[in-house]
Image (cartoon, helix red, strand yellow):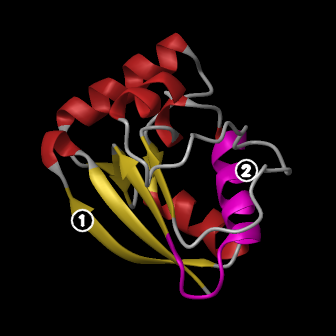
Amino acid sequence: LRARVQRAGLSNLRAPIELDASSSEWPVGQADAIYNANMIHISPWEVTLGLFAGAAQLLQSGAPLVTYGPYAVDGRHTSESNAEFDRSLKTRDPRWGVRDTAELKTVASQHGFDLEGIIPMPANNLTLLWRAR
């Protein structure tokens, strides 16, 4: 990623910051917003917990945390292909899987976030807009 940023030659783009989302220590002091794509389903649940905990430390009230990827909504997959993808992920690593918005809402609420919006995206993915309280 660092090489891509350098090749882009954009002076207004900072170098990427490497962080372990599951860690309680992030190498960032604050952020105006956080965007997370295609991580929640392909990592252990502890990483999702860390994402919300870390975001809670960095984001002020009203700031967005935006997550993107495949999700189940209130216990139901949004498509048969997402159900198949979920099974495939779990065979590769039982700690992975398409996460349910109901479970995410619980974790988010514990860290001071509310789900403000669910935006349908191509390929049966969703963008979830979380807002810090």
Which range of residues does the magenta coloring cover? Answer: 46-64
The rendered magenta stretch, by its main secondary structure, is classed as helix
Residue lying furthest right in this view?
Answer: 25
Left or right of 106 on screen, residue 76: left
Indicate whether 25 appears above or below 9: below
Q: Are marks 2 and 1 in contact (CB under 8 Å)?
A: no
On whether residue 60 falls in the magenta region, the answer is yes
**Residue 127, x across and y down, in percent:** 32, 58
* Amino acid type, label 1: Ile
Q: Which residue is mark 1?
A: 119
**Residue 81, x across and y down, in percent:** 20, 30
**Disc number at residue 50?**
2
Which residue is rendered at x = 50% and y = 21% of the image?
90
**Residue 38, x across and y down, in percent:** 42, 38
Alpha carbons under labels 2 and 1: distance apart = 23 Å
Tally the marks: 2
Residue lying furthest top in this view?
Answer: 92
- Which of disc 1 and disc 2 is earlier in sequence? 2
Indicate whether 9 appears above or below 60: above
* Amino acid type, label 2: Gly
Which residue is rendered at x = 49% and y = 13% of the image?
91
Report helix, strand or loop for mark 2.
helix
Q: Which quarter of the rendering shows the C terminus? A: bottom right
Residue lying furthest left in this view?
Answer: 122
Report helix, strand or loop for mark 1.
strand
Which residue is rendered at x = 45% and y = 21% of the image?
89
